[in-house]
Image (cartoon, rainbow, N blue to C red):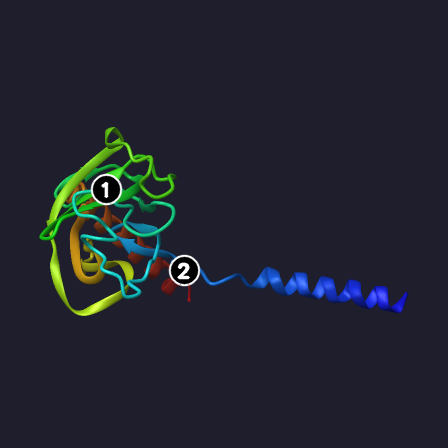
Amino acid sequence: MKKLLFALCLSASALSFAQDYSVPAASPRQKVEQQFSMSKISIDYGRPGVKGRKIFGELVPYGQVWRAGANSSTKITFGQSVNFGGKMVPAGTYGLFIVPTEKEWKVILNKDFQQWGAYTYDPKQDVVDITVPVNKLADKQEWFEITLNPTDENSGNLVIKWDMVQAEVALKPAKPDAVIKISDKLKEIKKIESDAAKAKS
């Protein structure tokens, strides 16, 4: 009986241990979230490694749509409508895809953000596409990476890099004048609240 109880306790302990750990992913999933203007932008994507392979032109063929990462398609969510490289995009979640060539990439936002890879990619579901230049990196980027770099309070760049290249998409609010007016009003409200709190103390 004691042996049975010991075995049951050991099994329960092992199960609890297993729930806290998992097999390392070949292409780990990453979520990036950052304040943008009056809302935020979040990105969910897989991060494949170079691992000694030739990436663009071989593993990722030129002229073919690519999932911009690994495994399930890359998802990007805008909390407010944005100017995406010069084109207006409503707030919402989109699939992010790329058609690479040696000197430039076509960056695509597609309505279908729940597909695996780009195997069921449908260009009829595209919301916008823009073409941006590709720049050479001085140092190799081993793991595929997407980052958001602010350029001021209401603007930033979506930076995509892997292996020896990177591309950037400029991001701005879709209606900058309205954003500035709302921002000014919010600052006024915060000042009133701050002054009221000081008066109480």
Q: Nearer the viewer, residue 57 or 97?
A: 57
Question: What amino acid is labelled 2 in the image?
Answer: Ala
In which quadrant of the rendered image does the C terminus lie? bottom left
In which quadrant of the rendered image does the N terminus lie? bottom right
What's the residue at 39%, 61% (across, down)? Answer: 197
Percent x, y for residue 12?
72, 62
Q: In 3D space, how far apart are the residues under numbered discs 1 and 2 (Cα atoms)?
A: 22 Å
What's the residue at 60%, 60% (across, down)? Answer: 19
What's the residue at 18%, 52% (across, down)? Answer: 57
Residue under circle 2?
Answer: 26
Q: Is residue 87 left or right of residue 76?
A: left
**Is residue 163 visible in this depiction of the protein?**
yes
Secondary element under disc 1, as helix, strand or loop, is loop
Residue under circle 1?
Answer: 65
Q: Judge the density around disc 2: few (<14), some (14-19), many (≥20) Cα neighbours within 10 Å.
A: few
Q: Nearer the viewer, residue 134 or 153?
A: 134
**Is residue 82 visible in this depiction of the protein?**
no
Percent x, y for residue 196?
36, 58
What's the residue at 16%, 51% (across, down)? Answer: 169
